[in-house]
Amino acid sequence: MQQIGTTVRAAVAAACGVFALTMAIAPVAEAQVRPWEDYGYVFVNYAYESGDRAFSESLTAPVYGETATYGASHVSGGGSGLDIGGGVRVWSNLAAGVAVTSFTNPSAASVTGTVPHPLFFNRPRPVAVDLTGLEYQERGVHLQAVWVMPLSEKLIVSVGGGPSFFSVEQGVLAHPSPITIGRETAPFSAVSINVSTSTASESAVGGNAGVDVTYMFTERLGGGAFLRWTGGSVDLPTHGAVQSIDVGGVQSGAGLRVSF
């Protein structure tokens, strides 16, 4: 619930930021916006996506005639990537656009549990292992209806949004039996475990909204920066239950713009 609340607050903050920037630009745009006379544009950005994702896995296994129990807590943060795309004018200042994003976010997991004793009944021993090197990879295709507002010969502001389609890969505990007991020696007071991982892949549908500010260095070449919110959720198969995790996040970045 805390994770959902954090994501909702981030989405609301991003939407409010886009709305506030749009409202700030609107009076200037109303007085100064020019007809958009280009046929279209392309862009490439180095981008960053914020995000704090968390989910858990749980499983049991028969060990020494009893039951070992394990739980894995996964967390991942933001990551960098690429944002490329473009658009074509369909009417007046309206363009049909698309942005393709690819982000890789570092992910980790803490595995804890109890393992039965090989000699004594009902005397479980605690275990704990930290897993690193897991990843959350996200690819998105964001369709957009974009209103392009040239405020001068050099400055262009664009606002748009639409549906988003995500494909995600998340490191999880391997199926069907990810945990094995390490070699045991007397007096069996401590125990070690070996944990194997795999990658779960799923897709999701969501939405996006954002703003782009471009400064043209020449008639066709410019540079710009963007702020975009994208969001959705995906049902990820894990040990214990299917986990619903948030995808997307607040994306920002800067790069090159080419008009034609």
Image: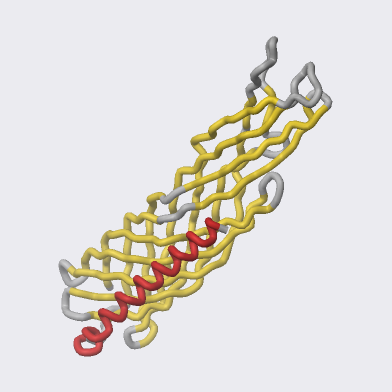
Q: Residue at x 54, y 64 (%)?
A: 232
Q: Position of residue 179 (x, y in %)?
A: 68, 31
Q: Nearer the viewer, residue 228 or 84?
A: 228
Q: Which quadrant holds residue 223? A: bottom left
- Residue at horizontal 54 percent and vertical 50 percent from the top: 54
In the image, 215 versus 107, the foreground residue is 107
Query: How many circles with numbers are drawn on the protein?
Result: 0
Query: Which residue is at 49% across, 65% downward?
Result: 8
Quarter of the image with the N terminus is: bottom right
127 to the left or right of 87: right
Height in image: 117 above or below 242?
A: above
User: Which quarter of the picture shows residue 183?
Assistant: top right
Question: In the rendered view, does 245 fall on the left or right side of 208?
Answer: right
| Residue 241 x/y as whole percent | 70, 50
Q: Looking at the figure, which quarter contains the C terminus?
A: bottom left
Position of residue 170 measured from the top left corner of the image (x, y, whole percent): 56, 47
